[in-house]
Structure formats: C-alpha cells, structure tokens
Image: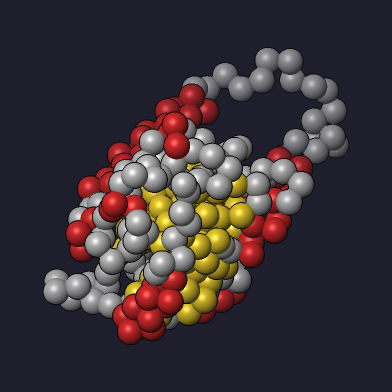
Amino acid sequence: MITIARLLGLPALASEHGQHVDQLIIYVHALMIVLFVGWLGFFAFALVRFRRSANPKANYFGVKSHASSYLEAGVALVELVLLAAVAVPFWARAVDKFPKPSESTVIQVVAQQFAWNVRYPGKDGIFGKQDMRWVTSENVFGVDPNDPAGKDDVQTLNEIHVPLVRNPDGEFKPVIVYSSSKDVVHSFKVIAMRVTQDAIPGMRIPVWFRPIREGRFQINCAQLCGNGHSSMSQGFLVVESQAAYDKWLASKTGAATSFE
Ligand SMILES: [Cu+2]
C-alpha cells in the first residue's frame, strides 16, 4: 500500500482515519485503470469491427437485442451495492464514533478573509458564552465580555497546537474543531489529517480527527474565498508532546483579547 501511495504522490499522512481515505483513493485509481483498459479495448474492437471496408452501407436499424439494457440494469445494481455496502458504512463510521468532548482537544475556528482565528477554552476548559450579537470585527467569536468563563480563553491567529497523547483507552486523543466564518464561505482543510470542512457564516460545524504523529502541518482554505485566498495557507497545525503543548498554551494564557 505504501509504495502505491508513493506512486500516486499522496501527501504525508498524520491522522488515524487518513489511511482509510488513502485506501479509498487507491481503490478508485485501480477501478479507473480497469475501466480505462476495458474501454480502450472496446474502442479498438469497435474500430476494427465497424471499419468502413467491412461495412460499406450503413445499418439504419442498429442493435435489436436487449443486452445493453440488461448491462445498464447490472451497472445500476452494482452501484446500489457500492452505496449500501461501502459508502454508507464508511460515513456511518465517521459519524457514529464522534468522540466525547471531555476526552478530546476542543478548538473553535472562525475563518475570515484571509486568516484563521483560533480559540481555546483556557485553563478552566470552558469556552466563554458566545452569541451572535456580541460579534464585532475584533470579537469574531462573539464572546460575552461579562462571562467569567471566557476570561482565560486563549485566542490565536493562524496557529493551532494540539497534544499527541494517549487517552486511558490507549487511543490517541482526538481533536474536535468547530468551524465557522466571519464573512464568506471558507473551508478548513488540513491535508495531512485528511479533513476538510466548509466554514459557513452563521453555522458552527464540527470536524474531528485523531493525530498519530508529531509535526507541523499546513492548513489550507479549500474554497476560493477572495483575492487573498492563497494566503490562508499560512495557517498551520502543530502536533506536539503534552509537555510542549502545555508550555505553549501557558505562554498564550492571559493573551486572550479583552473586548470591553
Ligand atoms: Cu478562505
């Protein structure tokens, strides 16, 4: 599998579910190769079989058998099986296993033209109360300035850190990112984590992944959101040891924006 992934030039992988995404990409490529060779063979057959010298006069009646109708019904049946046996279980696995917030690193992201605002709940583990009416150009998360839970929240720009640590169940700690947008539709994409989620104004949509190795990974915006769209790739995600993460978060504590 690894060599095929390299052959296809698949990017570095750093999340647990990402291997299934890569496998699907590889299977789709294999299927496309089979289809390509098959159709190429049919094309060659048609060129020879229906060549002009063998068919000097056109046949105005065409095919009379129902073979092609049966073939089409067969294809539809196969696609139905793919949908029910592959696509739906794949989706269900991602949706059903949504991790508990108490056992995850929970982060909020608000995209804007052209950067990523990131918010952590701070030491108390609780995000300050938020409401649309508090949203201003400085207070992009709409945090209630009177809520004490928000006082220790940590806010950064274009920078997400998460710890690489195992939960008591032996699995790496998941990361839940709630994404939204301040202006237009953006899309939070971390290729190494194999996640992409549109960031839509007025909505808060979660996406989750389980990092499996340390590193510094680029964040991209996957929706063409304006002139500076490409500069949103300045965002990055750092996966690091718990100690390094704690140190980083502590260095940010108190830097939370005050909105009074
Ligand atoms: Cu964008």
- Image coordinates for residue 80, horizontal then vertical, percent: 36, 35
Q: Residue at x 61, y 22 (%)?
A: 63
Q: Quadrant of residue 115?
A: bottom right
Q: Residue at x 50, y 62 (%)?
A: 156
Q: Residue at x 46, y 54 (%)?
A: 258
25 vs 231, left or right, is left
Between 180 and 214, which is closer to the camera in this rendering?
Answer: 180
- Image coordinates for residue 42, horizontal then vertical, percent: 64, 45
Residue 227, placed above or below residue 102:
above
Specify the farthest residue to the top.
61
Between 247 and 219, which is closer to the camera in this rendering?
Answer: 247
Between 101 and 22, which is closer to the camera in this rendering?
Answer: 101
Specify the farthest residue to the left.
168
Could one spot residue 255 in this view of the protein?
yes
Could one spot residue 28 in this view of the protein?
no
139 vs 172, left or right, is right
Q: How is the image coloured?
A: secondary structure
Q: Quadrant of residue 103?
A: bottom left
Number of labelled discs?
Answer: 0
- Image coordinates for residue 1, horizontal then vertical, percent: 44, 74
Between 253 and 53, which is closer to the camera in this rendering?
Answer: 253
- Image coordinates for residue 50, horizontal then vertical, percent: 75, 36
Residue 79, placed above or below residue 155:
above
Q: Residue at x 80, y 38 (%)?
A: 51
